[in-house]
Image: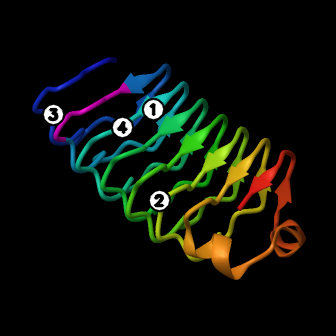
Amino acid sequence: MYSTGSQINSLPKLESVGGSLHLYTTSIKDLGDLKYVGGDLNIRRTQIESLGNLKSVGGNLDLAYSQIKTLGNLESVGGLLDLYNTPIESLGNLESVGGSLNLRNTPIESLDDLKYVGNHLYLKNTPLSKTTTEEEIRKQITVKGNILL
Protein backbone atom coordinates (compact mmCIF):
# COMPACT_ATOMS: atom_id res chain seq x y z
CA MET A 1 0.00 0.00 0.00
CA TYR A 2 1.37 3.40 -0.93
CA SER A 3 -0.07 6.79 -0.05
CA THR A 4 1.54 10.20 -0.15
CA GLY A 5 0.11 13.56 0.81
CA SER A 6 -3.33 12.14 1.59
CA GLN A 7 -5.63 12.67 4.55
CA ILE A 8 -5.21 9.20 6.09
CA ASN A 9 -5.53 9.77 9.85
CA SER A 10 -5.72 6.23 11.22
CA LEU A 11 -5.75 2.52 10.34
CA PRO A 12 -8.41 1.47 12.87
CA LYS A 13 -9.12 -2.21 11.99
CA LEU A 14 -5.97 -3.25 10.10
CA GLU A 15 -3.89 -5.77 12.11
CA SER A 16 -1.34 -7.06 9.61
CA VAL A 17 0.28 -6.08 6.30
CA GLY A 18 2.18 -8.87 4.53
CA GLY A 19 4.15 -6.52 2.29
CA SER A 20 5.18 -2.89 2.62
CA LEU A 21 3.16 0.10 3.82
CA HIS A 22 4.15 3.62 2.77
CA LEU A 23 2.28 6.56 4.33
CA TYR A 24 4.78 9.27 3.43
CA THR A 25 3.71 12.87 4.29
CA THR A 26 0.18 11.83 5.31
CA SER A 27 -1.69 13.22 8.31
CA ILE A 28 -1.72 9.83 10.09
CA LYS A 29 -1.64 10.08 13.88
CA ASP A 30 -1.98 6.44 14.93
CA LEU A 31 -1.73 2.93 13.50
CA GLY A 32 -4.90 1.62 15.14
CA ASP A 33 -4.70 -2.15 15.72
CA LEU A 34 -1.72 -2.74 13.39
CA LYS A 35 0.66 -5.30 14.94
CA TYR A 36 2.82 -6.54 12.07
CA VAL A 37 4.26 -5.30 8.77
CA GLY A 38 6.13 -7.94 6.76
CA GLY A 39 8.02 -5.52 4.51
CA ASP A 40 8.98 -1.86 4.89
CA LEU A 41 6.98 0.70 6.86
CA ASN A 42 7.49 4.31 5.79
CA ILE A 43 5.85 6.93 8.01
CA ARG A 44 8.38 9.69 7.24
CA ARG A 45 7.27 13.32 7.59
CA THR A 46 3.98 12.51 9.35
CA GLN A 47 2.26 13.64 12.54
CA ILE A 48 2.46 10.19 14.15
CA GLU A 49 3.49 10.28 17.83
CA SER A 50 3.28 6.61 18.82
CA LEU A 51 3.26 3.24 17.08
CA GLY A 52 0.56 1.89 19.40
CA ASN A 53 0.27 -1.91 19.21
CA LEU A 54 2.87 -2.45 16.47
CA LYS A 55 5.19 -5.32 17.50
CA SER A 56 7.29 -6.09 14.43
CA VAL A 57 8.42 -4.72 11.07
CA GLY A 58 10.14 -7.25 8.81
CA GLY A 59 11.95 -4.69 6.64
CA ASN A 60 12.96 -1.06 7.15
CA LEU A 61 11.07 1.35 9.42
CA ASP A 62 11.42 4.98 8.33
CA LEU A 63 10.14 7.54 10.84
CA ALA A 64 12.56 10.38 9.99
CA TYR A 65 11.13 13.89 10.40
CA SER A 66 7.97 12.52 12.06
CA GLN A 67 6.57 13.53 15.45
CA ILE A 68 7.24 10.10 17.03
CA LYS A 69 7.98 10.23 20.77
CA THR A 70 7.94 6.54 21.70
CA LEU A 71 8.16 3.20 19.92
CA GLY A 72 5.70 1.70 22.42
CA ASN A 73 5.24 -2.07 21.98
CA LEU A 74 7.61 -2.42 19.00
CA GLU A 75 10.04 -5.29 19.67
CA SER A 76 11.91 -5.79 16.40
CA VAL A 77 12.79 -4.23 13.06
CA GLY A 78 14.36 -6.53 10.45
CA GLY A 79 16.19 -3.79 8.55
CA LEU A 80 17.09 -0.12 9.09
CA LEU A 81 15.31 1.93 11.76
CA ASP A 82 15.53 5.64 10.88
CA LEU A 83 14.52 8.10 13.61
CA TYR A 84 16.58 11.01 12.28
CA ASN A 85 15.41 14.44 13.45
CA THR A 86 12.45 13.23 15.55
CA PRO A 87 11.42 14.09 19.14
CA ILE A 88 11.86 10.41 20.17
CA GLU A 89 12.11 10.04 23.94
CA SER A 90 11.89 6.27 24.37
CA LEU A 91 12.69 3.13 22.39
CA GLY A 92 10.02 1.39 24.48
CA ASN A 93 10.20 -2.41 24.19
CA LEU A 94 12.55 -2.43 21.18
CA GLU A 95 15.08 -5.27 21.50
CA SER A 96 16.45 -5.82 18.01
CA VAL A 97 17.27 -3.87 14.83
CA GLY A 98 18.59 -6.05 11.98
CA GLY A 99 20.19 -3.15 10.09
CA SER A 100 21.42 0.26 11.19
CA LEU A 101 19.75 2.39 13.87
CA ASN A 102 19.78 6.12 13.15
CA LEU A 103 19.09 8.32 16.19
CA ARG A 104 20.95 11.42 14.96
CA ASN A 105 19.50 14.80 15.98
CA THR A 106 17.11 13.35 18.58
CA PRO A 107 16.67 13.98 22.34
CA ILE A 108 17.08 10.25 23.17
CA GLU A 109 18.80 9.68 26.52
CA SER A 110 18.61 5.89 26.87
CA LEU A 111 18.69 2.80 24.67
CA ASP A 112 16.14 1.17 27.03
CA ASP A 113 15.74 -2.61 26.35
CA LEU A 114 17.74 -2.64 23.09
CA LYS A 115 20.01 -5.72 22.85
CA TYR A 116 21.11 -5.91 19.21
CA VAL A 117 21.91 -3.68 16.21
CA GLY A 118 22.95 -5.60 13.08
CA ASN A 119 24.86 -2.74 11.46
CA HIS A 120 25.76 0.83 12.51
CA LEU A 121 24.43 2.84 15.46
CA TYR A 122 24.23 6.59 14.77
CA LEU A 123 24.08 8.77 17.90
CA LYS A 124 25.55 12.08 16.70
CA ASN A 125 23.87 15.18 18.15
CA THR A 126 22.04 13.30 20.92
CA PRO A 127 22.34 13.58 24.72
CA LEU A 128 23.71 10.00 24.63
CA SER A 129 26.62 11.09 22.44
CA LYS A 130 27.69 13.50 25.17
CA THR A 131 27.18 11.25 28.22
CA THR A 132 28.40 7.81 27.14
CA THR A 133 31.30 6.14 25.38
CA GLU A 134 31.43 3.51 22.67
CA GLU A 135 32.85 1.05 25.18
CA GLU A 136 29.93 1.60 27.57
CA ILE A 137 27.40 1.07 24.78
CA ARG A 138 29.11 -2.14 23.60
CA LYS A 139 28.89 -3.52 27.16
CA GLN A 140 25.10 -3.01 27.09
CA ILE A 141 24.22 -4.11 23.54
CA THR A 142 25.69 -5.96 20.57
CA VAL A 143 26.43 -3.59 17.68
CA LYS A 144 27.83 -5.37 14.60
CA GLY A 145 28.93 -2.16 12.85
CA ASN A 146 30.35 1.16 13.96
CA ILE A 147 29.01 3.33 16.75
CA LEU A 148 29.08 6.92 15.58
CA LEU A 149 29.02 9.38 18.46
- Number of numbered discs: 4
Q: In the image, residue 122 lies at what x, y percent? A: 66, 53
Q: Name which residue lies at 62% across and 37% down.
A: 80
Q: In the image, residue 4 lies at what x, y percent? A: 23, 23
As for residue 51 lying within the magenta part, the answer is no
Q: Name which residue lies at 55% across and 64% down.
A: 125
Please identify the dominant SS of the magenta region.
Answer: loop
Label 3, label 2: how many angstroms apart (C-alpha)?
20 Å
Q: Which mark is residue 41?
A: 1
Label 1, label 4: how many angstroms apart (C-alpha)?
6 Å
Q: Which mark is residue 8?
A: 3
The secondary structure type at the circle numbered 2 is loop
Residue occupied by mark 4: 43
Residue occupied by mark 2: 71
Judge from the rendering whether residue 141 lies leftward or rightward of residue 84; answer left or right: right
Answer whether labels 1 and 4 touch (C-beta < 8 Å). Answer: yes
Mark whose residue sits in front, 3 or 4: 4
Asked whether residue 31 is in view, the answer is yes
* Pointer 3 local density, CA inside 10 Å: few below 14, some 14–19, many at least 20: some
Q: Please determine whether, in this image, residue 149 is positioned above or below residue 9.
A: below
Answer whether labels 3 and 1 touch (C-beta < 8 Å). Answer: no
Q: Amino acid at mark 3?
A: Ile
Q: Amino acid at mark 4?
A: Ile
Q: Amino acid at mark 1?
A: Leu
The secondary structure type at the circle numbered 4 is loop
Judge from the rendering whether residue 50 lies leftward or rightward of residue 11; answer left or right: right
Quadrant where the C terminus sits is bottom right
Q: Please determine whether, in this image, residue 10 is positioned above or below residue 2.
A: below
